[in-house]
Structures are given as structure tokens and as C-alpha cells.
Image: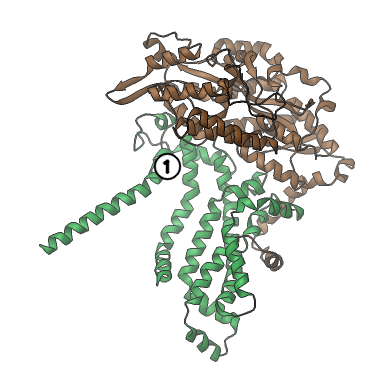
Chain colours: A brown, B green
Amino acid sequence: MFSMKKTGTILCALTIGLSGVLAGCGSSGKEQSASTGGTSQPAASTASSGPVQIDFWYALGGVRGKTIEDMVKKFNETHKDIIVKPAYQGAYQENHSKVLASVAANNNPDVTMVEIASIAAFADAKVLEDLTPYSQGDEKKYIPGLMKNSYWKDKLYAVPFNRSTPLLYINRDMLKEAGLDSNGPKTWDELVSFSQKLSKKEGDKITRYGFSTPVDIWFYEALVFQGGGNILSENGKELTINNEAGKAPLELWSKMVKEGIMKNPPGENYNAWDVAEQDFLNQKVGMIFTSTGSLTELKKNAKFDMGAAFLPANKTLGTPTGGANLVMLAKSTDAEKKAAWEFMKWMTDTEQTVPWSIASGYMPVTTEAIDSAEMKAFYEKEPNFKVAVDQLQYGYPRPMAPGYKELQDVIQKELQRAMLGQATVDEAMQAATEKGSKLLKK
Amino acid sequence: MYRVVLASRKTVEWIGLLIVGFLFVFPFLWMASTAFKTMPEVLQFPPTLLPETWEWSNFAQAWESGPFHMFTWNSILVAVGILILQFLTAVPAAYAFARYKFPGRNLLFGLVLIVLMIPGQVIFLPIYVQLSGWGLINTLWSLILPYAASAFGIFLLRQAFMQVPDEVIEAARLDNASEWKIMWTIMVPMAKPVLVTFGLFSFIYHWNDYFWPLIMTNSDEARTLPIGISSLHMSDGGTLWNVMMAGNMILILPILVIFFVAQRHIIKAFIYQSK
């Protein structure tokens, strides 16, 4: 369906003829490209007399996207010398591909959101700018537990923006009714016993499950950490899940599914998340794992006393952090980079991160924000929102390796194979390790 | 006796068709019904088939969540612009492949068929870089130009042109009609059902296309409806499905209208093809 070289030249002629018909689109678009094209012309920055214009790509839709647009508007109103142009670019994955393409074509944005496990890939490809010269120690304002995915080879490449941890969501009414501790299970053993008591059967049919979680790499990471394990070796070159800590999560989940006390929600990727959340809201399951990012919406729609709790512990408590960071692109001009840092600093400052956190359910990113009177008052009223922040003391960074984006797909596929009974736990871990090592050696 | 068997066979056929038809229409009806529900009702279990209260405001909410009039206008420009260019390139190409013998014809046609088999996602990067070099990224041109020639259109039209009897063309040539004239005034009208069908395929594909516009454009000024609607979806849960479905209804409405208007031609095209 694409033009070949030969037709290309003919088309040029044709399109000139047609430009009368399509005049409306050509002109409005041209202006756009002229402004974004500034990145490839260094002259623009030296001769800059007006405000610097920078592009900011974000990856959150719906109400959250709207909040981000409003924040940018406020920034533009308060900064006369900088104009930030925000643009929604699809979900994390789509934004990821798009940023890489735009870097290859020299029309990249200046600031963008990157899912934290992809930071290493971007940094390793030299797409990102080292932030140390800009921040000059300013990065100390961020919560240390959120910074572990910001560094690659000892250089600062990212600042936290919309950050989360997985939480255990519980239906307190259901727990009370079953005579259980309404603060939720504290350990894996309790998770099993609670689930047994919450599950209901009518004849052969299970009408209510105690527990449900998407079989997702993120929750798997959490459970591996809780067993004292790690996904990658210290140097990031080997997959270290073919051992007791790596197998334990799968053994726990598949045992619970077999027993009929855990539901494995169907659907690819985020669809499974939606299923789990809807089952929870409909009281078809009593407890689920999902992101703190869902807190605001779940709270709004739950018709029962909903609580959030730490993920239950195995040998220890443990959780990965999640969400996305803000990064600056290495190909921007000096003037753009200066403006970009100004913008990144502002977006993640206490004054912005507090309302952002309250509106979205993501965690505030500065220590000052957590101690602020406004946040404290909010937590007093909504203690569920504080759980993720408290859990951070048991937080681990997401595994850092340039190939982790591909690697997590490999692991996740094997997890699902084991959950669906297409492979034993040993086979799945063996296969994941073999395929994963190949990716890491690349 | 025989008549009874025949009648009951008819009934079975009817029931079978109804079931299959319902299976295909159901997802659509489900979308339509969700588009009118309130959010609590969407999440309700067991689900309701028809909305208890008709929430018309979902449509307004979807429409007002972004510059949708601009998205719609862009979608029309892109889908129609592509269609016009594809007709202008596919008709002469198909005519040449169908009616001329020239060296390398089979090789060239083979290349066209190869293009049919390569998904756009595989080769988007070089095209992106090229368009960026021309300064066309984030313009409607970047959405139109890469699709200006359609391998599928050439293939389909060539088949149709090959079925036109030689006598018709010879008669026209005897009357001193130019090749240009033969092509546009004889071949094209005779292939009208195929042209309409191809036009529909092309229009629907580009109207619904999500990947290409997302990659090629950065700002609302150059964006199309599917991207506007996808921005209603939240990444970490909490999507308003009723508003999302209302947005989808807005997206597919024009296609439905066109489909009902052109239905007759589509059926004709397939009968024509299978002759």
C-alpha cells in the first residue's frame, strides 16, 4: 500500500495539483512542522529572542491527561520565556516506539514520560540527556525510594513523575462478614486462608473468589522480592528466577487457582487488569492486587467499604515501584534543554505534585510533599492513599537492563503458560531463563 | 410430504442464519447499549442488556473531551484525500497491467503483490524518517502521501479490467478513441462495482486507522478521530467505558451510513468477481 519510488515523483506533481482541494490541511500542518523542526536547526537557539518552545509528550489518557494539560497551561502562564507544547502519544508502549522513531528522524520532543523499566533502554541507547549538570543536587528533594530507577551507570537520567506501587485492595465488608481481620492478610499463608474463607461455591460452581490478580510481570516481581529473590543478577546480565524465590509466586498462584480460591482474570495485558478491577467492584472477588493509580476510580465506584493494604509478605515485605518518570532528550539544543529542565523541575515540585497526587492517586514525589500540611490532612481523611507511600520503605526498583522491555514479555508469557497448565512451574522458569539469557546477551 | 420437508428445511436455514447474524451483530449492539448507560450500570453484574436510564450526555461528554470537530474534519480530509489519490494511481496502473504486454510486466506486478504482504508497522521507520526529512511530520500530508498508491487497489482493479471483453476495446479503438478515453469512459464505468467496493475498503481502513496517525502526528491540529477517542482511555484503569463507547459510536456512524447506501454495489462486486 505504500508508494514506490517511481510513483513518488508522479505523486509530487499530482499533489501540487491537488493542493487547492486540500489547502486547509497543508497550511495548518506546515506551521506545526516548522516549529517542531527547530530541534534540527541549531541556529534557532542562538538567535532566540522570543520564548523557547519545547515539546512534551505524555502517555496518560482520560481525566489524567486532562490534569496534565491543565498543569502545563499553568506552567506556560507563569513562565513567560518558555512555551511548552504538550501532546498525548498513546499508552507507555506507543509513546516508547514513537520517541525512538522521532529520535531517528531528528524531530524528537524535548521532555517525555518513560515507563520506569524502560529508562535503562533509553539511557543505554544514548537517547537521554544526563541531568546532573542541570539538577546540581536538586534531585535530593525526591523521595529516595522512587529514585532507584532514575540512574543508569551512575548517571542521573530521570526524575519521578507519576509513580505507583501495587497494593492489596480489600473488601472490608466481605472480610468482616466472614469474621476475618478487616485490615487484610499480612502473609502469604493468611492470603490463602482468607481466600478460602471468602470463596463461595454453589454446587460445582464457584460464585465468589477470595482473591484475583492479573498474572502480570509487575506483581510477579513483587512476589519474587518477597521471597528474597531478584529478577536480574546484580550486574544486570543474567536472569535469576530459575530458583526457589522465582518459582514460589507461580506455585502460590497456581495452587490457589487449582483450589478454586483465586481467579485468573482473562485478557491480554491491561484487559486482565480491567477484569480484576470490575470483578472486585461487583464483589465477585474479595481481594485483588492492582496499582495505587486505580485508587481514585475504584473508590468512586465501590459500593462497599474498600480498603488498601500492603502486599502480603512471604519471607519479607517487598514491592516494586511503577509508573513513569520524566526524561530530557539528548538531541535537543542547549536552550531547549535549559527550558526542559525548568519544566521538569516545576512539574515535580511539591506545589504541583501534591494536587497531582490527590487528583490522580499516584504518589507525591518529593519528601517535602509527604510532610506538607495539605497532604497530611488528605491522608487523615483518606488513609488508603497513604498506604503506597508507607509501603515504599520496602520498595525495590524495577529491574534495570536495556532489554528489559522485551524480557518482561518473555517472562510474562511463560507465567501465563504455567497458570494455564500448559507448562509446569519448572518448565516455565527453565524456558523463561533460556529465552531471557539470549535477550540479555544481545 | 415433500413440501413439508422443504418448508422445515427453510425454517432451519432461517434460524441458522438468524443465530449467525446475531453473533456478528451482538458486539455492535453491546457497544451501542453501553454508550447509553450510566457508569454504575456499566459495572453492574449481571449486566443489563438495555440501559435502565438513557444517558444521552455520554455523547456530549465524549465530543467535548477534545477538539472533535477538528478530528472529524481531519479524518474526512485524510480518508477522502487518500481515496482520490488511490483512484488516480490505481486505475492507470491496473489498466496497464491488465491490457498491455511490456517487458518486466510480471516482475513489476509481482512487486505490487509483495507490497500487499508487508504490514505497515514493519516499514514505518524509514517512511517516518523520509517524511521527516521533507518536513511533513505532523501534517495531514504525512497521513495521505504514504498511502497514495494502493497495491490492493491495483490488484483488484486489474482483475476487473481483465474481464472486460476484448471486443469492447477493439470496437472503441476502431472508433479512434484514445487509450486515455478508453480507460476512463469505458473501463472505469464497467468496473464500477469493484471501484465502489475498493473505495469502501480503503475509506473504512483509513477512517479507522490508529497506528499511522498516532506515529506521524504530534498535535491535535493534525490528528484524526481514532486518536481522539483513544485518548479517552486511561492507562492504569478507571476508564469511563460509557463515554468511550459513545466516542466509538461517533467514529463509526459515517461508516455505517456509507455502508447502507453502498450495500447494493458491494454485493454486486462480489457476484461480479466470482463469475
Q: Farthest right residue?
A: A46
Assign the C terminus of chain A to one quadrant of the image.
Answer: top right
In the displayed structure image, the side of residue B155 where residue A55 appears, left or right:
right
- Where residue A51 sits in the image (x, y, percent)? 82, 37
Q: Nearer the viewer, residue B132 or B6?
A: B6
Q: Nearer the viewer, residue A298 or A6?
A: A6
Q: Residue at x 61, y 50 (%)?
A: B121
Q: Secondary structure at mark 1?
A: helix
Q: Residue at x 44, y 56 (%)?
A: B257
In the displayed structure image, the side of residue A124 where residue A204 appears, left or right:
left
- Where residue A17 sits in the image (x, y, percent)? 68, 67
**Tag 1: amino acid:** Met
Q: Residue at x 64, y 44 (%)?
A: B220
Subunit that carries the residue with mark 1: B
- Where residue A271 sits in the image (x, y, percent)? 49, 34
Q: Residues within 10 Å of mark 1 (few under 14, many from 20)?
A: some
Count of numbered tags: 1
Q: Is residue A3 visible?
A: yes
In the displayed structure image, the side of residue A168 where residue A318 appears, left or right:
right
Assign the N terminus of chain A to one quadrant of the image.
Answer: bottom right
The vertical placement of B204 against A66, above or below, is below
Would you identify the image quadrant in which residue B85 lies?
A: bottom right
Q: Farthest bottom residue?
A: B174
Q: Which residue is mark 1?
A: B31
The vertical placement of A254 against A437, above or below, is above
Q: Nearer the viewer, residue A352 or B43?
A: B43
The vertical placement of B242 against B18, above or below, is above
Would you identify the image quadrant in which residue B256 lies?
A: bottom left
